[in-house]
Image (cartoon, rainbow, N blue to C red):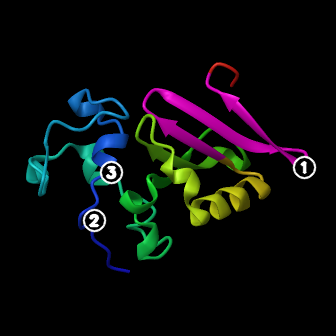
Amino acid sequence: MNRACGACSLCCTTMAVPELGKPNGVKCEHLTPTGCGIYEERPESCRRFICSWLDGVGDTSVRPDRVGAVMAVEDGGLGHDGIALVLYTKPGDESYKKSRYLNKVSRQIVERGAGVVVVSGNDRTYYSKDGSRFRKATTEEA
């Protein structure tokens, strides 16, 4: 499936770029109105990253900028083999909670025994299955 970021640049704000010293939740200084200002010289972590939407997950209505979260499957330290769905969001923006798609996918993943991690700036919220209930833990509790 061939997808392009188009008008979406949410990862450039929600995700850290270690090579640039850019933390999660802070707009990249190289982000311009037309995209990455250093695209040809962008850091390796930017070159390697492909969000789940670009990788073919969901339809066009769930592009990250439309649902308020960048989806990635990563080693989240939770669930089956530590794999988790990680949702990167802007600090203070909880619009991703309104997405029926993200809610459905998150619940399915947790029900299967994997975890969901919501990363919003320096804050992380972990969701995992605890018996028949969902357990929510903050970074301090984890």
SS majority, magenta: strand
Query: x and y percent of residue 17 in the render?
Result: 29, 36
Asked whether the residues under the numbered discs 2 and 1 touch, taking CB atoms below 8 Å apart as contact, a structural biologist would say no
Q: Is residue 58 above or below residue 9?
A: below
116 vs 19, nearest the viewer: 116
Going by the numbered disc 1, the residue's amino acid type is: Ser
Q: Quadrant of residue 78?
A: top right
Q: Which residues are magenta?
A: 116-139
Task: Kindly give the residue lying farthest to the bottom in the view shown.
Answer: 1
Residue for point 55% across, 32% down: 124
Residue 70 as seen in the image, left or right of residue 129: left
Task: Kindly give the residue lying farthest to the right in the view shown.
Answer: 131
Label 3, label 1: how many angstroms apart (C-alpha)?
34 Å
Going by the numbered disc 2, the residue's amino acid type is: Cys
Query: For the residue labelled by badge 2, is the local secondary structure a helix, a strand or a loop?
Result: loop
Q: Quadrant of the N terminus?
A: bottom left
Query: For the residue labelled by badge 1, is the local secondary structure a helix, a strand or a loop?
Result: loop
Q: Quadrant of residue 30?
A: top left
Residue for point 34% across, 36% down: 16
- Name the residue beneath numbered marker 2: 5
Q: Is residue 76 above or below residue 121?
A: below
Query: x and y percent of residue 86 in the render?
Result: 54, 47
Task: Kindly give the residue lying farthest to the top in the view shown.
Answer: 140
Q: Quadrant of the C terminus?
A: top right
Local crowd size for mark 2, using a 10 Å CA cut-off: few (<14), some (14–19), many (≥20)? some
Query: x and y percent of residue 107 in the render?
Result: 71, 57
Residue for point 72% across, 45% down: 79
| Label placed on residue 10 | 3
For marks 2 and 1 on the same chain, the one whose residue lies earlier in the sequence: 2
- Name the residue beneath numbered marker 1: 132
41 vs 8, nearest the viewer: 8
For marks 3 and 2 on the same chain, the one whose residue lies earlier in the sequence: 2
